[in-house]
Image (cartoon, rainbow, N blue to C red):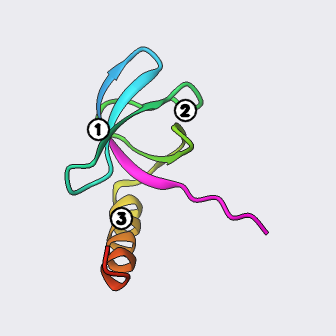
Amino acid sequence: MLMCLAIPAKILSLQGEKAQVDFGQGVLRDVNVSLVEAKLGDYVLVHAGYAIQILEEKEALETLSLWNDVLASTGE
């Protein structure tokens, strides 16, 4: 069984269909936002370089906190 992961990120800048997003702790990446109607400051769920869903800030921050807990427990 194959499992896919999507990670929340905050949109820092937008230019056309590309956005620079922050995954937290200074991890910045460029992603494609053509699948969603996101705006500056939105949190989006990112999978394989694409924003696939807009998230409420509270939900995004809770998910990022859980990811940080998982990474801390594995020594990453």
Task: Please tell me the numbered disc located at residue 64.
Answer: 3
* Label placed on residue 36: 2
Q: Residue at x 46, y 55 (%)?
A: 7
The spot of residue 47 in percent (x, y) is 55, 47
Q: Is residue 47 left or right of residue 63?
A: right
5 on left or right of 42: right
Q: Where, by quadrant of the figure, is residue 5 drawn? A: bottom right
The Cα–Cα distance between marks 3 and 1, rounded to whole angstroms, is: 16 Å
Residue for badge 1: 41
Helix, strand, or loop for circle 1? loop
The region drawn magenta spans 1-11
Given the image, on which type of amino acid does mark 2 rest? Val
Q: Amino acid at mark 3?
A: Leu
- The alpha-carbon separation of the residues under discs 1 and 2 comes to 14 Å
In the displayed structure, 48 sits above or below 39; it is: below
- Is 20 situated above or below 28? above
Residue at position x 64%, y 58% from top?
4
60 vs 56, nearest the viewer: 60
Who comes first in sequence, dot 3 or dot 1?
1
Magenta-colored stretch includes residue 2: yes
Q: Residues within 10 Å of mark 3 (few under 14, many from 20)?
A: some
Question: In the rendered structure, which disc, 2 or 3, sits on the residue that comes first in sequence?
Answer: 2
